[in-house]
Image (spheres, rainbow, N blue to C red):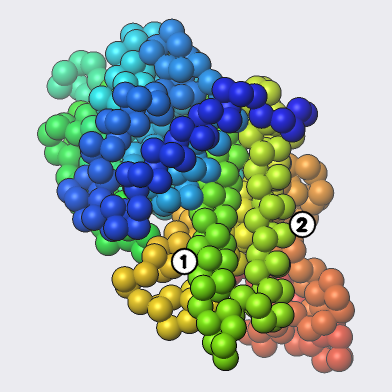
Amino acid sequence: MDAAFTEEQDEIRRTLRTLLRERCGPDEVKAAVHAAPGYDEALWRQLARTLGLPGLALPAAYGGVGCGVTELALACEETGRVLLPSPLLPTVVFAAPLVAALGTEEQRAELLPRIAEGALTAALAVPGRALPEALGLVGARDGARNGMWDGAQAGSWAGGGRAGGVQARPDRDEGTGWRLYGQVEQVLGGHSAELLLVAARAGGYARGRTLLFLVPAEADGLVRTRLTALDATRPQARVELRDVPAELLGVDGGGSGSGDEVAEALAAVGTAAAAVLAAEAVGAADAALARTVDYVRAREQFGRPIGSFQAVKHRLADVYVAVQAARSAAYYAAWAAAQGGGAENTEAAVAGGLALAQALEAQRTAAAEAVQLHGGIGFTWEHEAHLYFKRAASDELLFGPVHRLRARAAEREGLFGAADRAPYGGHEGRGGNDVHGGRDTNGGRDAQGVQGARAGQGRPDGPDGRDGPDGPRKAVAV
């Protein structure tokens, strides 16, 4: 790995930082999130026209800049620094790579040039609030019960042919095309996107497969409702599909439309997205830290800046170390993802998951310290500290949690045996704690194991919580 950035990469970062500093201050962010689309459309067009941001990672053959994951990660680090409300994440990071990987040549030629020039925005709609599972960032919640650990391959996150999710059936009236029925919650940018990529189950339960479908915003039967989100800079929507006509992304019958191909494409997108999201979180954490440092230098108490007190210095030093470590991990993950290999690039997948986990922790720490060290003003709506805190909390809810990201990375590396895999991504269902005998890895009493014993699954008679006379104890997954 070459840790030095090229002149072109430095120029991308420098130019974007300058533009966003001028056009995307805290007041502009607060105004943009209240607009109908949830972002500043004029700024988005400027980013597309002057910097080619929507097409940064798209091939030049389709009107893109022809850069890769590393450049996209650097750009998102700058957008994260100012908490830029934009369709960059749903359109460029999630939707466009799927169109490029699965779409027919006709679909790519029609959609990708419009995305690259900023004329078309898109969103990925995954049922069941299971976006991190679909992208392979975390393991499936019901993976142990299905006998499958990989949620992307199992397709259970898309409904599995049961009630719920989104169901797809061939359009018998038209003879071609498909019809979709179902509902999707928490679709990032879904209320304003001009194109939806909807994951749906086709073929019923026994022989079902998860496919991706293209649904234009003006489709009959499509109802989209903007939701009140914790982080207003990431607008979310509820998407209802009531017998909506749709076009299959790719081809059916063993080609791009097969369930395995879709799962592999989603996993490859997830590998790159993890690195990009990690870089974005690092940018937000670094900005929160910088704003806090500036404040403690200026705020005086007892006749001296509060930043001169040793307790404040220590807290900020811990945040600085966390941010720098997360930045290094994010850069390495971007480099590994840029080497290619798709879903088979295990090193990139592991690095991406671990980098995202570390970046989310650093972002949460930096945002929390920003609120605390700003004192009373940090809790007010007028100050921007709460924006960073909400971004940190929202990111972990949308793409985590951290312990499941790390558990998935450990599973990819083969650190857990089959008996250790649990539906919530932890060892025996408790985030890595060994609950055999009611003890964790430190020899302490595991609360969940004791609760399970008290529920009639065995009583811990001894001080170490071993099996009692009621029978062998069982691990309880929550």
Label 2, residues with CA under 10 Å away: few <14, some 14-19, many ≥20:
some
Q: Position of residue 70 (x, y in %)?
A: 60, 30
Rendered image: mark on residue 389: 1
- Residue lying at 30% horizontally and 13% vertically, measured from the top left: 110
Instruction: From the viewer's side, name the closer residue of 361 and 446.
Output: 361
Q: Secondary structure at mark 1?
A: helix
For the N terminus, the image quarter is top right
Q: Amino acid under label 1?
A: Phe
Q: Amino acid under label 2?
A: Asp
Q: Position of residue 333 (x, y in %)?
A: 67, 38
Q: Position of residue 218 (x, y in %)?
A: 14, 32
Reading the image, the residue beneath label 2 is: 420
Q: Secondary structure at mark 2?
A: helix
- Residue lying at 49% horizontally and 43% vertically, measured from the top left: 78
- In which quarter of the view is residue 344 placed? top right
Labels 2 and 1 touching (C-beta < 8 A): no
- Residue lying at 76% horizontally and 28% vertically, measured from the top left: 2
Left or right of 3, for residue 117: left
- In which quarter of the view is residue 96 placed? top left
Instruction: From the viewer's side, name the closer residue of 296 and 472.
Output: 296
For the C terminus, the image quarter is bottom right
Left or right of 373, for residue 223: left
